[in-house]
Amino acid sequence: MRAARRRMPVQLTVVGGIVAALLAAILIVSQRSDRVTHPVGTVSVLGNEIARGHCTRGARLEVVDESATTVVIKFASRGEPLGDCLMCEVARLEEPIGDRTSIDETTDTEIGVSDACLDFLRDRP
C-alpha cells in the first residue's frame, strides 16, 4: 500500500508534464496558423528598410526572398482591423532596394511605393 502511494505522485507529475507540453504545443501551432495574408499594396522605403502601413493586430511584414533583380515581400496579420489608425510594420532588406522590383508574394504583382510610413522610418533610432 505504501509503495502505491509513493508511485502515485510521480505518475501524476509525469502526466501533468505531458499535458503541459501538449498544451504548449497547441498554443504555438495556433499562434502560427491564425495569421491571414493580405496584399502588400504599397511600402515606404528608406535605405535597407521597408515599411507597410496597417491597422491590425499581430501584423508582420516579411521579406520572403531577395535576388539581384527582385525582392519578394509578404504581409500577414491576425484578427480584424482595429479601426481608423496607422501603424507601420518594418522589415529589413539585406541590401537597399535600389532598382530591384518589389513583388507581392500573395498577388504576384509589383508593389508600389508610398510615403505613408516614411516619417516613421526616418524617426527610428
Image: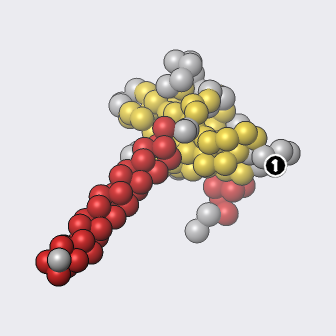
Q: Can residue 54 be seen from the camera position used here? A: no
Identify the residue at horizontal 83%, vertical 45% (top origin).
83
**Where does the C terminus fall, quadrant-wise?**
bottom right
- In the figure, 108 relative to 12: above or below? above
Q: Callout 1: helix, strand or loop? A: loop
Q: Can residue 73 be seen from the camera position used here? A: yes
Pick the residue in front: 78 or 67.
78
Q: Outermost residue toward the front? A: 1
- In the figure, 91 relative to 7: above or below? above
Identify the residue at horizontal 61%, vertical 49% (top origin).
58
- Say which residue label 1 marks: 85
Q: How many marks?
A: 1
- In the figure, 65 relative to 5: above or below? above
Q: Outermost residue toward the bottom? A: 2
Where in the figure is residue 78, as x and y percent of width and height? 62, 42
User: What amino acid type is highlighted by mark number 1?
Assistant: Cys
Where in the figure is residue 119, as x and y percent of width and height? 72, 55
Identify the residue at horizontal 49%, vertical 25% (top origin).
105
**Which colour assignment does the render follow?**
secondary structure
Pick the residue in front: 111 or 96.
111
Quadrant assignment, res 110: top right
- Badge 1: residue crowd in 10 Å (few <14, some 14–19, many ≥20): few
Q: Outermost residue toward the top? A: 108
In the rendered structure, the answer to whether residue 57 lies left or right of residue 24 reads: right
Q: Outermost residue toward the right? A: 84
**Where does the N terminus fall, quadrant-wise?**
bottom left
Identify the residue at horizontal 54%, vertical 23% (top origin).
106
Where in the figure is residue 39, as x and y percent of width and height? 62, 27
